[in-house]
Amino acid sequence: MSVTIVTATGSYLPSVSCPNEELDQFSPEARRLIGEKTGVLCRRYAEEGESTSDLAVKAARRCLEESGVSPGDLDGIVLSTSSPDRMQPATATRLQALLGAFEAFAFDINSVCSGSAFGIALCDALVRSGPYRHILLVGAEVYSRILNRRDFSTYPFFGDGAGAVLFSRGEGEAGVIHSCLGTDGTRADVITVPGGGTMLPFEKMNSPRQAYFRMRGEEVLAFSLDKGPAVIRRLLEETGVAKDEVSCFLCHQANINIIRGIAEKLDIPLERFFVNLDRYGNTASASVLIALDEALRSGAVRRGDLVVTVAFGGGLSWGANLIRL
């Protein structure tokens, strides 16, 4: 039976590093609290003039170099981003051009920080149901351009980065096994960029600050601690897989206390959750894909391992995927 296998992974983190100590727009006490309350110690920022598609293409190239698949062999490109180059066209179109993948269709998805889970499910469906051999999924974000640098509730916690996974048609037991997705659109305003769209065009904005990213942190924390464990339980129940069979849980890298809370609710040792948010902060829809690449390259997970990826974010949205690497 045909399956959707993970052929290769890649990631790119910009070279500009910003540890908490350099966030001098905030007080020393506030800077100390960033690490204590979230686990974020440092983040990366895109260089001046570097856009979301510029980060995306670097992650994509690393992924394709590892795979041995050329850009011309790609059938499709799915780019997950909530910080696109422009409102239109899709940022994936510039990624396609930069890669030279001119035989591939290309489009964006935006499920905010849940983009990895939605993207994995979508690529799996495309490979299983269509005449497609190779679909490239990229998550890329440059949140430093949509944040108010003086907003302590958002700015310290996010970073820029990109991750990529090449999905290919294959045979055998390895591959994407199952996905679970969810959305609660009644809570769409919990995480949002209010201005710049058709609901609030630029000319109707009261302040340029309405074009900045906003979130209601306490609600996001409660939501994540509810939906994160719930979607993992659902995923394992629907597949009949025991939690002890899973080698590693690759969770959205938002806050160490969220990851710790999910682990405690599931009675799973924290050591089985991969963590890199201390170095990169929250890279939104790129975070799980970056974590997957780093986990494979570091040996934290190996080919043949069973892993769970789980993400949650704006929409509000959430999702999880069970994959044998």
Image: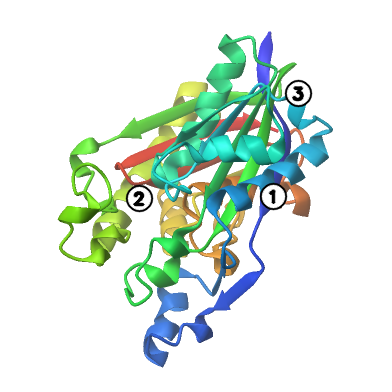
Instruction: Tell whether 303 sits left or right of 108.
Output: right
Closer to the chain start, of discs 2 and 1, is 1
* Towards the viewer: 62 or 292: 62
For the N terminus, give its image quadrant.
top right
* Towards the viewer: 88 or 186: 88
Q: Residues within 10 Å of mark 1 (few under 14, many from 20)?
A: many
Q: Residue type at mark 1?
A: Lys
Residue 58: numbered disc = 1
Q: Residue type at mark 2?
A: Ser
Closer to the chain start, of discs 1 and 3, is 1
Give the percent coordinates (x, y) of residue 155.
39, 70
In the rendered view, tell whether residue 293 sits above or below residue 42. above
Residue 11: numbered disc = none
Q: Residues within 10 Å of mark 3 (few under 14, many from 20)?
A: some
Give the percent coordinates (x, y) of residue 34.
43, 77
Helix, strand or loop status at disc 2: helix
According to the picture, the residue beneath numbered tag 3 turns out to be: 73
Gap between marks 3 and 2, in whole Å?
Answer: 38 Å
Gap between marks 2 and 1, in whole Å?
Answer: 30 Å
Image color mode? rainbow
Residue, x 55% and y 57% (percent of image)? 270
